Image (cartoon, helix red, strand yellow):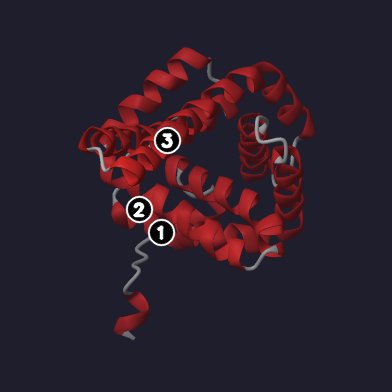
């Protein structure tokens, strides 16, 4: 499925649309969130768990129900790749933490520079994973999915950063609610990412026609 280009306004609209989608499909997305949380507890399974959540939400967007067969088939096909891919930003983050510790201990400028570069690499790798996992959940092969994700991230740098900021915001807000993280985060983030990359489901496209985030302030 084609990945659309986005700007700040499109990401904002996708965020609002994802919240509305979660409200309409609350019970199913709560189960997706809980399943994602439980399956991610070993940490090394975060990648396959996230890929499964993407596949579940994608099937829900298309058929108004979670296709368990599609989820299982997607994880079986790309689960190992997802696990390895998810380790890339984690590895860079670990390197950044080591350099940060080195800088705090000895005040090394080289450690500071390398820490900043490792942090940038971790963030970039995490952003590339969003369109990659979305493509894998749609049945794409690994190499074309990664190549397309790199091109999309470069072409939509501002939009990709906005997606990352929106995801971080959801992480902070749901994390502060404790139980909210378990029952909301996984499903809502997957919906937000797919809304951004694929656009709203047909049911919401007509409602969004001519919509503006400033509409309420003009009334």
Q: Can residue 12 be seen in the rendering of this structure?
A: yes
- Residue at screen point 46% across, 40% down: 198
Q: Secondary structure at mark 1?
A: helix
Badge 2 local density, few (<14 within 10 Å), some, or many (20+)?
Answer: some
Is residue 160 among what the camera can see?
Answer: no
Q: Which mark is residue 98?
A: 3
CA neighbours of label 1 inside 10 A, class few (<14), some (14 to 19), many (20+): some
Q: Quadrant of the C terminus?
A: bottom left
Q: Secondary structure at mark 2?
A: helix
Give the mark nearest the N terminus, 1 or 3: 1
Q: Which residue is located at x 52 percent, y 33 percent?
A: 134
Residue 175 vs 111, above or below: the answer is: below
Q: Is residue 82 left or right of residue 211?
A: right
**Can you give x and y, in whole percent of width and height, for residue 56 in the image?**
68, 39
Q: Would you name the residue on which mark 1 appears?
A: 13
User: Viewer-nearest of labels 2 and 3?
Assistant: 3
Q: Nearer the viewer, residue 9 or 122?
A: 122
Residue at 70% from the left image edge and 47% from the top image edge: 64
The image's mark for residue 114 is none
Residue 10, numbered circle: 2
What residue is drawn where x is 43% and y is 55%? 166
Position above or below: 203 against 105: below
Residue found farthest to the bottom: 219
| In front of the other: 78 or 194 | 78
Q: Are marks 2 and 1 in contact (CB under 8 Å)?
A: yes
Q: Secondary structure at mark 3?
A: helix
Corner quadrant of residue 50: top right
Q: CA distance from mark 2 to mark 3?
A: 37 Å
Q: Position of residue 160 (x, y in %)?
A: 35, 43
């Amino acid at each position: 499925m084609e990945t659309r280009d986005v700007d700040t306004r499109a990401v904002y609209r996708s965020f609002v649309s994802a919240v509305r989608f979660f409200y309409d499909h609350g019970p199913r997305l709560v189960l997706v969130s809980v399943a994602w949380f439980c399956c991610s507890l070993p940490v090394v399974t975060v990648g396959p768990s996230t890929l499964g959540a993407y596949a579940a939400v994608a099937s829900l967007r298309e058929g108004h129900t979670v296709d368990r067969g599609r989820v299982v088939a997607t994880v079986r096909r790309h689960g190992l790749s997802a696990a390895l891919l998810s380790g890339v930003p984690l590895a860079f983050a670990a390197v950044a933490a080591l350099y940060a510790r080195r800088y705090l201990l000895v005040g090394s400028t080289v450690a500071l520079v390398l820490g900043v570069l490792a942090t940038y690499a971790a963030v970039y790798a995490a952003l590339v994973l969003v369109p990659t996992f979305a493509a894998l959940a749609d049945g794409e092969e690994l190499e074309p999915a990664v190549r397309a994700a790199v091109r999309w991230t470069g072409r939509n740098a501002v939009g990709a950063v906005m997606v990352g900021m929106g995801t971080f915001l959801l992480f902070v807000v749901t994390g502060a609610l404790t139980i909210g993280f378990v029952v909301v985060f996984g499903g809502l983030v997957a919906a937000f990412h797919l809304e951004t990359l694929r656009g709203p489901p047909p049911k919401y496209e007509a409602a969004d026609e001519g919509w503006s985030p400033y509409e309420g302030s003009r009334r």
